[in-house]
Amino acid sequence: MEPKTTPKCPQTVTIRRNPPRKAKATPSASAAAIPFSSSSSSAIKDIPSFPLEEILSIDVPQIPPLDLSKPSKDDEGCETLRIFLRIRPLKPNQSAKKKSNGVHGTRPRSKRASPQTEANKNTKKNGSFLAVNDSRSVTLTPPSALQDPKRIKTETYDGFTHVFSPDSSQSEVYEKMMDSLVEDFIRGKSGMLVALGPTGSGKTHTVFGSPREPGMVPLALRRIFSWTDESGSELPRYFYLSMFEIYAERGKGERIYDLSPNGADLCLQQSTVKGLQEVMVSDVAQAESLIARGMLKRVTAMTNANSQSSRSQCIINIRSAPNMIYEEVEVPPNNAVLTIVDLAGAEREKRTGNQCFDAIATKLVISSAGSKIVRKQFHQQHIDGVQSMPKREEDYLDTSFLLRQALPFMKIKFNNVEELSSLPCQKRLIHTLRRIEQPKRRKFSDLDAVINEGMGAREEQQIREKEADVVSEKLHELEPLKVSITCPKVIKSESKESALLKEEYCIDMAKNERNGQIMRDFSKAIWNALKQYKRKLEVSENEVHCLKEILTKEKTRYLELEQEMKDFKICCSCCQQISKEESSLKMGTITDSCSTGSPQPGGHGSNIVHEASMDPYYPNLRASDCKRDLKICNATVGQSQDISLQMESSDVVDTPSLCIEDFKEQNCQVNVDSCSPNLNGYECNNNLRECVESSDVVDTPPLCIEDFKEQNSQVNVDSWSPNLNGYECNNNLRECAVTTRQSQEIFLQCINQKRESFPGKKNLGVVDNSSNADVTAIGSGHSESMVSSSQSHVLVRDEDCLLMEGNKLDCEEEKKLLEPPLTEEDVTCINGCSINNVHRREPNLNSSSKPLNAEKPKRRLLPASSILLKETSGLDLEEQNEKPKTWHILLSVTFVDGSEWCITCQIAVFFE
Ligand SMILES: Nc1ncnc2c1ncn2[C@@H]1O[C@H](COP(=O)(O)OP(=O)(O)OP(=O)(O)O)[C@@H](O)[C@H]1O
């Protein structure tokens, strides 16, 4: 019955390499399989069966055998520690049984049988638990007593350099395992052979052997001393042989003993045996004799496993040294060492009580040479029925234990740097070698040609010596570089290949030496630079420290100076104040000095003029400057003002009379004379002020204040340059006339004198302080005052009036209150001296200074605008004249000055 559905792709075939398990088919699977099998039966008719037989018949190419004569190197040039495995044969009495049983797997394996299967078969047949799989692996099968009856557990150990079967001979082992070490040793490369394995496994047998079957040591010695080059020359070297053992005693630790004839106990210091004696040997017989004597001294103790077991580690060193007999040939020093170690049994301590497989021996052996070859020799326990099962099981455990211990050694890699560095071979700079490389090759080419031409060994040697001389010359050229280079010499018996090998080796050494020298020089340079920078840094830090100290000192100094400056400023301000005070006092002093003698023409005034002419303001002095100076003058004459007040308060009653006119004529005239056209009004007025201020001319003859005033004003007017208005001049006059005590005194005296000229008038005087309350109320603070009688006029100009300009009514009312009966002149004054300007006089701007000898100008002083007679007792002037003591007159004098200003001031004068 054909199925309804057919496969979409009948050509698709699934081939299972592994046969399917024989599991019960599930119902669904069975159901599905039936139609598939029935339907596909026709489709797979053309599909060939799996070519299993064909595949199995193919001959698999055999892996080329390893060249055990040379150590294998990886891509990085590192060698892998070579590990050989040698299986000890059964004892001789069991050899027949071994042969009959085919123990140790030497029988060729079946192609289809796996190594494990083959080993298991061998193990089952002969009872051996170790089978050789191939030249690199073995399989360890536990004995039946240790096996799980349901499951056999086998262990395969792979990766050995070579596995020697039990029937391998000593020579075979030497050829594959030892020969490369010996050849390298002859070429100058150190090597080491270490025998490791359980007790009785044949380590000593392999290392030393027997007379019939010499081991690795005697075979190596024979090779070394029998080595000749192509020309048949022996090695121009000596060999030194040393031999010592390390053994352990229970409770005493490890001991080292020198096995040389004169040997003694040794000590181990940092993996180095101290005091070991070396015996120079010159031939193989001498060497074997030394070894034999040393073996006799070797401590051997009975163990449970091996009645002849050596319970110590035996180390033999063969060192190569140059033979100095060959003087004509410089032989490079060669300290290559060939070390052969026979360790004690490495079985578990529980079984043998052996402690020799300890760390110290392993460390010593492994670190004593660069190239290490570990040879494992396992004890294959024979099955003879003599040994009990526990013995066999112990052997298995020891073998398994040791194989596990050996696994890490297979992964050890090393290079020959250490060995090469130990050889003090010739060193060259690589670039130099490259330079000489070309001629050297040419020489070799010549050498080859010579050889091909059949020249003898003598000519060849001559060519090599010449070549060595050339190299020596090149190397001597490098001496200035102070690079330690030894001229390479070609050994007589050295072959061409050996020379080339040395050449390459020297090149490498030169590279290393040059790189090392460069790094050393670089390090020194960096170190020196760092030291220099460190010194500079220290110097800089010191400088910074010093600068900080200086800065701190400067800051302190600055603060001190600043404080001093503040103090100085304070002092200066004090000094200025003091100077002002002193100036005021000086003015008084000047006044006093002026009063001491009669003024001389051109004296004091001339000096002032001279100073004025030196005034830097000149001729740019303006009215504002005059005002400023006058203000200063006003400020500095406060004392004079006070004196004025005192004067007003009748402190000058007893002062002698004086004639201000004479003073003015003698002094001010001089000043006027000094008012040259080049001297503006400021200087002139200033001079006048100085004259008046200094007019402490008590003894001077009486003067007429009107004349003084007129003359001065006239002068002032004349001296008014367009740059100086009348205010400044008048202000000067005010300053001069009012602020000085002397002037006021003069004024009073002048008034008194004038009063004398008026019948019925008494002199002006000052009443007592007790009766001048009203006077002070009116006159106090007025810096300028002039008094006059009803017929005389005193011009008083006061800044208060200026200040009162904005309060005209008050000023006017006050004037009215103070105004006395007006005279004709008073009326004139009043008409011109309104509150704005009582009398306005146009300044004569075009007028120049009058000559001193000119006629006295007409008085322009206007009479007082008003004289208020304050009658405390209700008396008039006439009555006062008649009864002067009962009259107290308060004079309010208004002086009209200039064309712009009118200043009114009141001064109380009491008539007694
Ligand atoms: N390959 C071999 N061929 C013939 N005899 C062997 C072989 N290997 C070992 N033997 C013999 O086995 C015995 C024990 O060997 P050997 O003393 O070398 O063992 P060992 O490992 O050095 O023991 P130990 O560690 O206790 O010193 C010796 O009698 C030795 O002759």
Image: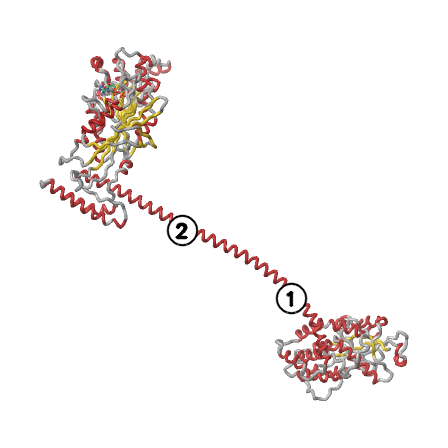
Question: How dense is the environment of label 2, judged by Cα within 10 Å: few (below 14), some, or many (20 and up)?
Answer: few
Q: Nearer the viewer, residue 275 or 649?
A: 275
**Location of mark 2 (residue):** 532
Q: How is the image coloured?
A: secondary structure
Q: Quadrant of residue 354?
A: top left
As drawn, 135 above or below 627: above
Evaluate whether residue 860 shows in this view. Answer: no
Residue 733 screen position, x and y as percent? 72, 78
Tell me the amino acid under the disc marked 1.
Cys
Identify the mark nearer the N-term, 2 or 1.
Answer: 2
- Please state which amino acid type lies under the numbered disc 2: Gln
Among the 4 quarters of the image, the one containing residue 603: bottom right
Residue placed at 9% from the left, 40% from the top? 454
Quarter of the image for the N terminus: give it. Answer: top left
Q: Position of residue 286 (x, y in %)?
A: 19, 29
The residue lying at 56 percent from left, 57 percent from top is: 555
Q: CA distance from mark 2 to mark 1?
A: 57 Å
Residue, disc 1: 572
